[in-house]
Image: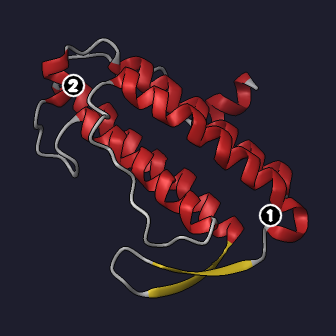
Amino acid sequence: MTPDYIRTLLDYNYWARDRSLASADQLSPEQLSRNLGSSFSSVLDTFVHIYMAEWIWYHRWQGDSTARPDTSSLVSLAALRDAWAPLEQQIRSFVESLGPAGLPRTIEYTSLNGQTSTSPFWQMIVHVVNHGTYHRGQVATMLRQLGARPAQSTDMIVFFREH
């Protein structure tokens, strides 16, 4: 796993996130928060979950496995974007600081279920990207359930073609 490939994965992750968030802009506040019975009840809750997971992983990488973000103010897409922009920059800066020698380095952390785990940085970063992809797929389905248009394609091949 090279730093260039990890950088590309992060570029893809935030490109796809931005497309998905833009697609949710068409929703009314009621639609954005409507319980649709998915893994996370609403479109907004699903985006907040993706953000929260990135936040937790970033803090694990900083040595704090017990930190949890305060998401109480994330009640709109604007608030979520405002919180996510600095987190994206923190993640990008941290990944850049790892360099080629840091990507295979392992750290120990505590998972949400309280178990101690050990993983190399590159696997955790790939997981963060894959996790976002999984939940953005759920958002696409929820948008359809609400009668809204899903995002422009967030397929990775489309990202590669456009970049």
Asked if 132 appears above or below 20 in the picture, the reply is: below
- Which quadrant holds residue 15? top right
Image location of residue 110, percent across then percent down: 47, 80
Q: Earlier in the sequence, mark 1 or mark 2?
A: 1
Query: Which dot marks residue 131?
Result: none
Residue for badge 2 = 32
Q: Secondary structure at mark 1?
A: loop
Asked if 153 appears above or below 98 in the picture, the reply is: above
Looking at numbered disc 1 in the image, what kind of residue is underneath it? Answer: Met
Residue ranking furthest to the right: 100
Residue for badge 1 = 1
| Marker count (numbered) | 2
Residue 26 appears in the picture as rendered = yes
Asked if 3 appears above or below 79 in the picture, the reply is: below
- Which quadrant holds residue 142? top left
Image location of residue 151, percent across then percent down: 42, 22
Question: What's the residue at 62%, 59% (across, down)?
Answer: 126
Image location of residue 46, percent across then percent down: 30, 42
- Which quadrant holds residue 32? top left
Q: Are marks 1 and 2 in contact (CB under 8 Å)?
A: no
Screen quadrant of the C terminus: top right
Question: What's the residue at 39%, 60% (across, down)?
Answer: 68
**Foreground residue, 136 or 90?**
90
Image location of residue 93, percent across then percent down: 75, 47
Residue 13 appears in the picture as rendered = no
What separation in Å lies between label 1 and label 2 (alpha carbons)?
Answer: 37 Å
Asked if 149 appears above or below 109 in the picture, the reply is: above
**Foreground residue, 44 or 160?**
44
Question: What's the residue at 58%, 58% (across, down)?
Answer: 58
Looking at numbered disc 2 in the image, what kind of residue is underneath it? Answer: Leu
